[in-house]
Image (spheres, rainbow, N blue to C red):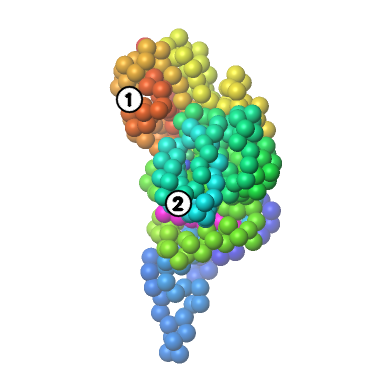
């Protein structure tokens, strides 16, 4: 399906789902074709050469990939059935005996899976704080992949993508950026030199907490690593289903508006929390006091995201008491949905300080959210 041909901004691209009109009906919403298999004619030729078996891919998957790839200034994009499936697809390209340099303190699910994979494959894993240029320099040396996550979850560290691009080149590595917390609206890491950008599309891209999906996009589609990822997704069958792709496209149509509102709300919530006597620290790149603020200003446009964390004076008991009193912020994991969520990460990830609460700020009226926090913190 061809996208809007003239250059348009991402807001327009997303709002019009790439501008695709159903050629059969003129419908302004792409049709959902759930068939897994497609017929051949009397000569045994496929009725439609692009439609044979939907494990290859589907019209809706391709449309969602094309829209997201265009927004990321990518040469190509691929959707997966979850963010973790997309992460695994990249990491599986590293050969036995290879080396991965990975940012420490990122989403725990990624760290855990990559550690296990590297252990099984005799791959050297170097975990380092990539937001700290000096620390990164100390591990310079040949590597296959440099994996960063910016802003990071749950510590909201900002990592300099341009610096990491240069560092990765010196190591002979591909730079992969998990840009989930930034969304394609706020940041396009490929424009700063990254080789592959990754998203858990489960989060802000879909935005309604009702689809699991992962996305990868590449700067150079002729990169052998990209070729390997594409072939493995096809042959191993890790494709996103049509219905999920349809829901994702529907969710993406409002992504720019949602992200704009969520960033504004998160900024106000972060400023409110920073001034609260019960809060010892707020982690959010939108605060001018944040160590990553100036880099975030350089590599993000339109806001600093909907994710933030804060630490409660009084330790674990005080944090758990506050979370228990929240009514509007739902106690649930995940982020990037229209509804606000709160999580005590220590409960499931014991290396996170036990006084830290992570918020995913939604699109509700910010005064209601701040009143909820005020009542909970006392
Ligand atoms: N990357 C980040 C930063 C995440 O927060 C998550 C999930 O929370 C993932 C990757 C994994 O995505 P998924 O849950 O869609 O598999």
Disc 2 from disc 1: Cα separation: 46 Å
The residue shown at (41%, 12%) is 313
x, y (%) of residue 252?
Answer: 50, 48
Mark 2–mark 1 CB contact (< 8 Å): no
Q: Residue furthest bottom?
A: 43
Q: Quadrant of ligand 1?
A: top left
Foreground pick, 87 / 268: 87
Q: Residue furthest top?
A: 277
Judging by the rendered image, the residue that carries numbered circle 1 is 327
Query: If the image is split into quadrants, where does the N terminus sit?
Result: bottom right
Is 93 magenta? The answer is no
x, y (%) of residue 255?
Answer: 52, 43
Write down the region rendered in magenta. Answer: 76-81
Helix, strand or loop at mark 2: helix
From this view, report whether residue 67 is shown above or below residue 200: below
Q: Is residue 126 left or right of residue 171?
A: left
Q: Is residue 228 visible?
A: yes
Judging by the rendered image, the residue that carries numbered circle 2 is 121
Which picture quadrant has residue 345?
A: top left
Which picture quadrant has residue 6?
A: bottom right
Query: If the image is split into quadrants, where does the C terminus sit?
Result: top left
Foreground pick, 112 / 192: 112
From this view, report whether residue 137 is shown above or below residue 371: below
Foreground pick, 180 / 42: 180
Q: Main secondary structure of the magenta part?
A: strand
């Amino acid at each position: 399906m061809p996208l809007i041909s003239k250059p348009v901004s991402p807001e327009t691209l997303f709002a019009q789902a790439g501008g695709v009109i159903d050629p059969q009906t003129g419908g302004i919403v792409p049709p959902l074709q759930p068939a897994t298999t497609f017929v051949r004619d009397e000569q045994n030729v496929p009725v439609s050469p692009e439609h044979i078996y939907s494990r290859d891919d589907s019209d809706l998957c391709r449309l969602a990939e094309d829209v997201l790839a265009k927004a990321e200034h990518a040469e190509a994009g691929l959707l997966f059935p979850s963010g973790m499936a997309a992460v695994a697809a990249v990491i599986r390209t590293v050969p036995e005996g290879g080396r991965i340099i990975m940012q420490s303190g990122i989403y725990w699910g990624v760290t855990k899976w990559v550690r296990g994979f590297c252990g099984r494959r005799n791959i050297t894993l170097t975990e380092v704080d990539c937001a700290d240029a000096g620390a990164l320099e100390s591990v310079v040396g040949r590597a296959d992949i440099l994996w960063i996550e910016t802003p990071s979850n749950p510590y909201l560290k900002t990592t300099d993508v341009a610096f990491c691009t240069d560092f990765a080149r010196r190591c002979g590595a591909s730079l992969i950026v998990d840009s989930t917390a930034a969304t394609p609206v706020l940041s396009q890491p490929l424009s700063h030199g990254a080789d592959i950008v990754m998203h858990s599309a489960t989060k802000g891209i879909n935005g309604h907490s009702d689809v699991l999906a992962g996305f990868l996009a590449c700067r150079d589609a002729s990169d052998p690593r990209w070729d390997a990822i594409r072939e493995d997704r096809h042959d191993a069958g890790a494709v996103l289903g049509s219905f999920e792709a349809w829901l994702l496209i529907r969710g993406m149509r409002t992504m720019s508006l949602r992200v704009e509102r969520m960033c504004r709300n998160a900024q106000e919530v972060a400023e409110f929390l920073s001034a609260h006597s019960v809060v010892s620290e707020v982690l959010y790149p939108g605060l001018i006091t944040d160590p990553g603020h100036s880099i975030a200003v350089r590599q993000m446009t339109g806001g600093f995201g909907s994710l933030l964390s804060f630490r409660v004076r009084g330790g674990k008991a005080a944090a758990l008491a506050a979370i228990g009193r929240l009514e509007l912020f739902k106690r649930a994991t995940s982020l990037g949905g229209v509804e606000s969520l709160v999580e005590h990460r220590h409960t499931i990830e014991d290396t996170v300080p036990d006084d830290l609460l992570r918020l995913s700020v939604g699109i509700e009226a910010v005064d209601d959210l701040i009143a909820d926090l005020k009542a909970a913190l006392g």
